[in-house]
Amino acid sequence: MKFIADLHVHSKYSRATARNLDLENMYIAAQLKGITVVGTGDFTHPGWFSEIREKLIPAEEGLYKLRKEIAGECDKNVPPSCRGKVRFVLVSEISNIYKKNDKTRKNHNLVFVPNLNIAAKFNAKLDKIGNIRSDGRPILGLDAKNLFEILLETSDQAFLIPAHIWTPWFSVLGSKSGFDSIEECFEDLTPHIFAAETGLSSDPPMNWRVTSLDNLTLVSNSDAHSPQKLGREANIFDTALSYSAIRNALKTGDPKQFLGTFEFYPEEGKYHLDGHRKCNVCLWPEKTIKNKGICPVCGKPLTIGVLSRVEELADRPDKEKPEKTHPYYSIVPLIDILSEILQVGPKSKKVQRNYNAALTELGSEFAILYDLKPEAIEMAGIPLLGEAIRRMRNKTIEISPGYDGEFGRVKIFSEDERDNLRGSAS
């Protein structure tokens, strides 16, 4: 069965997340996006774990679904064109902050478990180590290797994926507090790591430049802090619908089972380039080197972004590939495309109205972004949408790159083009 999975999301119990980020709204958003498997996120938080137990019931092996009566109410908010099966898999992100090799390390890791009983046992172990109640993504003064040991001791079917591995502040390879290799972090447990999350600010070709990542399956997820952000990155599987099948596809990297990823254009990510947001300074790696990593405005250290960090660790020339790779498809969220077309903010009523109209007429967001022909997309009656999707797929768009926590900005049409194309269409 071919399906799309977003394995890294959060709940309303995590800091800086939307109040409506609950299982019901995840279920609705997954259908609108065209996603079949969604990570629960935050299962280590007692309040969220209680909601998971209350609202989800077992479905296929290792997967869960909303109770029928809850799902029935939620389906009223999903147009018939988007309705589909939604399953949940138990996953939580842990923030590890600790000292190793005389340096403070801050990295985030995704932990996956096969059932609620294992999750409860794992939570009980973490509860003895640190505070798992104050944040959906708990902050633990625990070496990432020790976290992984505890996880494997709890279940040999559990697995860990280092999260957004290049992000400057909180990742295994980040410029601020990371390591120079995954092996330096996980030591003798490294062979048990079989996948890594690329994050919004990098894409597979950037990761291919680092040979130590060659044997890992590169995954992409949304890290959503609101239901609307679900699916901004995601994974494509062709397996049985089960926990073990998903785990096996990631472990083996079998190209017939793991079909690749949907990716943010890395320039859209908020840590792609180096910079200093307060000073409106954004620099490419060469300029950063010339400035010796110092902001030319205030004289303080720049936040070194993902591109620079990849360049630092790269030991393979650009555009060369390892033997084993998976396809990837660069996308721009439909909300952002409509915002650019309509020249209003992505949260505006006008954008939301057109978004709902497109989904009602054409089907899920991934169907629009990836499957449908531009001519069919035009049938929704939204001027320029088909042409915008065509340009997105052909990578003929402009992006002002993100830096130091500022997302990149997408530009698909110039003012003159927009007017001319609208005139031609009418």
Image (cartoon, grey):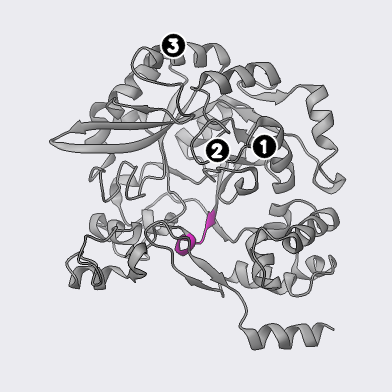
Residue assigned mark 1: 26
Residue 295 falls in which quadrant of the image? bottom left
Mark 2: give few (<14), some (14-19) or many (20+) Cα within 10 Å. many
Quickly name the residue at label 3: 124
In the picture shown, does residue 48 fall above or below 231? Answer: above
- Whether residues under marks 1 and 2 lie with C-beta atoms below 8 angstroms apart, the answer is yes
Q: Is residue 48 magenta?
A: no
Q: Nearer the viewer, residue 223 or 389?
A: 223
Q: Which residue is mark 2?
A: 9
Distance Cα–Cα, label 2 vs label 3: 22 Å
- N-term-proximal mark, 1 vs 3: 1
Separation of residues labelled 1 and 3 (CA atoms): 26 Å
Say if mark 2 contacts mark 3, CB within 8 Å. no
Task: State how far apart marks 1 and 2 are (Cα).
Answer: 9 Å
Give the image location of residue 226, x and y in percent: 60, 43
Circle 2: element type: loop
For this rendering, which residue is in front, 83 or 292? 292
Magenta span of residues: 263-268
Q: Residue at x 53, y 44 (%)?
A: 221
Q: Is there any visible trace of residue 58 in the rendered image?
A: no
Image point (23%, 58%), residue name = 312
Q: Against 168, is 350 above or below?
A: below
